[in-house]
Amino acid sequence: MNLEILGRPVTKIGVVGSGQIGPDIALHFSKVFHRHDVPIVVVDIAQEALDRGQAKLHKKIDKGIESGAFKPDMGQAMKDSCQFTTDYAQLSGADFIIEAATEDRDLKARIFGQLAGLVSADAVLASNSSHLEPEEIFAELADKSRTLVIHYFFPAERNPMVEIVPGAETSGELVSSLMKFYEAIGKVPIRVRSRYGYALDPVFEGQFLAAALLAQDDLGTTKEIDSVACRALGLTVGPFTAMNLTGGNPITHHGLQQYTTKIMPWYHSPKILADRVASGEKWETPGRGEKIDVPEDRASEIFDLLRGAYFGIVCEVLDSGISNIADLDMGVEIGLDMSPPFRLMNEIGVDNALALVEKFAARYDGFKVSDRLRKQAATGKPWSIPTVLREDHGDVAVITIRRPKVLNALNEDAFDQIEAHFKAIANDDSIVGAVLTGFGVKAFVSGADVNFLAEIDSKQMGFETSWGSQQSVMVVEKTGKPVICAMNGFAFGGGNELAMACTARIARKGLRLLAAQPETNLGIIPGAGATQRLPRLIGVENAARLIRTTKSVSSAEAVELGLIAKEVSGDLIDEAISMVRGAADGTSPLTAIDPSPMETPDALEPVDIGHRSKAVDAILCRAMIEGLRKPLDEGLRFESEMFGEVCGTKDMKTGVTNFIENGPRKPAEFAHE
């Protein structure tokens, strides 16, 4: 795990401000760093605030212990790692300090002026501002290269989203390093160019403004609008409920007034909000479990207007150039817990989305209709939303599968994007090879998206589904250049199959869970190459045992079996890039899978398959025995044919339905037919 910033290990972390979010930021750091003996120092000038913050942190840890999320000794270590103090001098020696004080420019400037004299010239100074531009916050510091905004989202210890917002003079090397650092500690960072409010708060606050305007115009009560908003935007709680939970009325009131000139004239603080700020009263919202009946005509109007505002707001951020489609779609979904906007527009049709935006703009003056949205609608095509990203490191392309909400699970679109990237790499004379990895530290690829399996209704459709995946995986294998799979976390099912198509594989050292083929738990067989590639890598007997029993292997076991080349304790991507270059120039050649036919027995060794389907196991054994006697490409096609056969069984439907309804923990009750 890369717990370094700019190549230096983090040895002490400071958090300034023990109000609403500071203790939660400290709590997240304590979860990561307590085992590394890194102290977390929380400073505030008010002892009362420190006492509240410490009590809040301890209460959340205690709840984690009660729920089983933390073991008692871990919880105590987390508490012990956090110090709450009024003494700024305790921050001396900190490598990384995050200010989480009140959203006041002058206050923040004074804090950083004081901090600059306490810490070394190498220390990183960050503000958890929600709106202010870094150029404003750090204007008075002589060295701005080590300063930036890192915007957390509520609740900071659990919400993985963070916006990394550099100022004009922030070191580019620091930004890149912090992106890697936050990924390593379990967050999902996106880089956003400096603008008041950044990328995501204008969406959150703008959506609230739209809801408030509808209430102010008597199109519905706050209860009704909250209820409809949940359906229209995929929210867990409506905008008025969210404002109550976060205590956000005052800061939203101020932010909306600034957006008027800094984003577009439509943004303003409406009278209905100003009155609530003045009174201090909360919004009237649905109670827990309360069902709100909204007349259909009113609900439809609210629904359309909320969606029109939503699409228009997000597309304005896109037009501004401070973010991109991939980051916005993911950031809104994860950070704000809303339906991903560009996927939602694709679902209803981009032309229909434009019509909704125009409807909202016609009702409310100053609301901008996005140029990008108009142009996209004119093409008649959906938005292209990258979830597989390419970044070239000189002559090596690094391909990252980034679908963190589903642990990088593969769907049809992800397969298509992988295929397109590797075709481009094959034809790019400036690139000598590639690294394939996944986002985060938990999963390389957690498998294939199971939901598509429920749509398979015939043997032919099963074959076509499998063979389509095989085509994408084979493109990786046939790139014609070395491809190293940097397994940043576990690889299940299709994830392991994709890894095996690479020239070689490496993994982070010490992973207790690295690879498994769990398909037979779902009443299916592997459909993207495992029956053919895994035996060629680790032998027929070992492969058959792992696939038939779904047993997982650790990174150390994977080395022993020959599934991966080695474990890596340092930077995984750097090591993979080095291996690519060594293979490309011949100094460290790699041996790919031998595609020749293999000798196989007429029957596989008996193993205990437990509750799993005997009918599916029989098809699996046939796929391995007969498929391995063919050249690899023919064997892969045969595997797809056998996948189609499985899709004609009763047990396939039983297994997939059970997984979707009950998850992986409840075994399916197979009929063995």
Image (tube, rainbow, N blue to C red):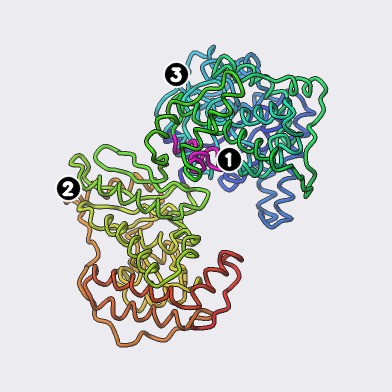
Q: Earlier in the sequence, mark 1 or mark 2?
A: 1
Residue 6, above or below 461:
above
Q: What kind of residue is marked 1? A: Val
Q: Residue 641: where, in percent of width, then height?
A: 33, 73
Tell me which corner region of the image, top left, top right, bottom left or bottom right, holds residue 558: bottom left
Secondary structure state at the residue bearing disc 2: helix
Label 1 sits on residue = 38
Q: Residues within 10 Å of mark 2 (few under 14, many from 20)?
A: few
Q: What kind of residue is marked 3? A: Ala
Q: Which mark is residue 585?
A: 2
Q: Please report the bounds of the magenta region as a residue range.
A: 325-345
Q: Is residue 448 visible?
A: yes
Label 3 sits on residue = 168
| Magenta-colored stretch includes residue 608 | no
Disc 1 vs disc 3: which is toward the camera? 3
Mark-to-mark CA distance, 1 and 3: 31 Å
